[in-house]
């Protein structure tokens, strides 16, 4: 991974050196800082933590990265519940590796968020209080073993479509974290597809279980993994679409996003329909058909109110997900305290605090 290019930082205290003799250099004004920031984006350079950035840019990044990190650690729960019920040691080891990857993704992203001046503990506290959100897709219960395959194939597949452009997002630490995340998510998608393929090639009961999982996970993936609609054509009402479009325009102007939510949603449908056909699975949308004129698959409108009600913050599964996360955080407090004490120990002492005598004659 290429390191960020070396350049002078933009800060509020930065001054412009006067050419030749003259008055002392003056601090840059807000307008000058904004102009330099926009020029940096126009040149395709990444913004680094040392650079000046507008407050709105920082807030948008903190919100997006925090929600992304929260989604990774909450998203471990539906699949993690099946670790002790995997049908074979091979499948268990594969699923365990995947769940561990998701935990690592959360850590990469919390680290990226901390470069913006926020504290990881503050972000987690906000999640636990319900003040920050995660992808509501993961409030969907995983009812059968086939759900682990559908989650990896569909929701992780949607994540790759959604997140691959973030490898080139304008904020450097976020972009670099996403390159690692997307590499691993691509393997998760292949793992999920492989599991679904095995079920579809198995007994009629196994294929029926795979179809049932797709029936339940397809529309949540389409609806919720890409964010709210930002065009009326995608099924959003005029007010919701206008609000989504305004947010997308600002994020695209700042280089945080490169595509609208609805463009990415269309890309996901185009990607998954041929895969489902190869598996012999029917996607639960009678509106799916190839549109020769558009060069894309048409698909039915999303009932956004249905998903807000079924998978919202106040549903039983949502409360269960958050309660489990809070309990795990509290149960792990002693580990964090021990790690902090170990990191703070005086140089030259062992884990018990005894000064090492190694090398002393």
Image (cartoon, rainbow, N blue to C red):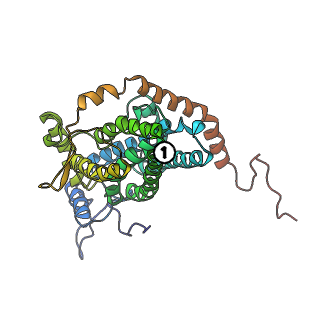
Residue 239: give x, y in percent of width and height: 14, 34
Q: As drawn, is 71 to the left or to the right of 271?
A: right
Question: Image point 33% across, 62% down: which residue?
Answer: 46
Location of residue 49 by image quarter: bottom left
Q: As drawn, is 155 to the left or to the right of 78?
A: left
Q: Is mark 1 on a helix, strand or loop?
A: loop
**In the depicted view, which residue is nearer to us: 262 or 347?**
262
Quick check: 118 above or below 8? above
Residue 160 seen anywhere in this rendered image of the structure: yes
Residue 81: give x, y in percent of width and height: 53, 34
Residue 13 seen anywhere in this rendered image of the structure: no
Q: As drawn, is 97 to the left or to the right of 143?
A: right
Residue 212: give x, y in percent of width and height: 39, 35
Q: As drawn, is 148 to the left or to the right of 15?
A: right
**In the depicted view, which residue is nearer to us: 192 or 229?**
192
Q: Look at the image and tell me in which quarter the N terminus lies.
A: bottom left
Going by the picture, which residue comes out furthest to the front? 204
Please tell me how crowded label 1 is: few (under 14), some (14-19), or many (20+) other residues with Cα within 10 Å: few
Q: Look at the image and tell me in which quarter the C terminus lies.
A: bottom right
Question: Image point 39% across, 42% down: which residue?
Answer: 66
The total number of labels drawn is: 1
Which residue bears the numbered disc 1? Answer: 202
Quick check: 79 above or below 90? above
Going by the picture, which residue comes out furthest to the right? 361
**In the depicted view, which residue is nearer to us: 209 or 313?**
209
Residue 164: give x, y in percent of width and height: 35, 56
Question: Image point 36% across, 47% down: which residue?
Answer: 280
Quick check: 313 above or below 272? above
């Amino acid at each position: 991974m290429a390191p960020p290019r070396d350049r002078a930082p933009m800060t509020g205290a930065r001054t412009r050196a006067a050419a030749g003799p003259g008055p002392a250099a003056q601090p840059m004004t807000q307008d000058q800082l904004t102009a330099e920031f926009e020029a940096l984006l126009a040149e395709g350079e990444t913004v680094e933590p040392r650079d000046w950035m507008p407050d709105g840019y920082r807030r948008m990044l903190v919100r997006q990265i925090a929600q992304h990190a929260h989604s990774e650690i909450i998203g471990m729960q539906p699949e993690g519940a099946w670790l002790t019920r995997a049908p074979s040691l091979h499948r268990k080891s594969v699923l365990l590796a995947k769940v561990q990857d998701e935990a690592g993704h959360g850590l990469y992203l919390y680290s990226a968020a901390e470069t913006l001046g926020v504290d990881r503990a503050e972000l987690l506290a906000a999640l636990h209080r319900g003040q920050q959100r995660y992808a509501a897709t993961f409030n969907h219960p995983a009812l059968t073993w086939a759900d682990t395959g559908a989650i990896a194939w569909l929701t992780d597949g949607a994540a790759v479509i959604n997140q691959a452009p973030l490898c080139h997002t304008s904020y450097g630490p976020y972009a670099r974290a996403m390159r690692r995340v997307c590499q691993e998510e691509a393997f998760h998608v292949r793992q999920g597809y492989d599991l679904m393929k095995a079920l579809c090639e198995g007994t009629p009961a196994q294929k029926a279980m795979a179809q049932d999982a797709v029936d339940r996970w397809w529309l949540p993936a389409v609806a919720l993994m890409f964010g709210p609609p930002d065009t009326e054509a995608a099924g959003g009402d005029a007010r919701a679409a206008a609000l989504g479009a305004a947010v997308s325009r600002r994020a695209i102007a700042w280089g945080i996003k490169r595509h609208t939510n609805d463009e990415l949603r269309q890309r996901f449908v185009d990607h998954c329909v041929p895969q489902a056909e190869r598996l012999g699975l029917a996607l639960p949308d009678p509106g799916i058909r190839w549109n020769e004129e558009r060069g894309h698959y048409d698909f039915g409108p999303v009932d956004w109110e249905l998903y807000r009600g079924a998978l919202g913050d106040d549903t039983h599964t949502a409360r269960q997900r958050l309660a489990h996360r809070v309990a795990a955080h509290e149960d792990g407090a002693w580990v964090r305290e021990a790690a902090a004490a170990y990191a703070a120990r005086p140089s030259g002492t062992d884990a018990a605090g005894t000064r090492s005598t190694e090398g002393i004659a």
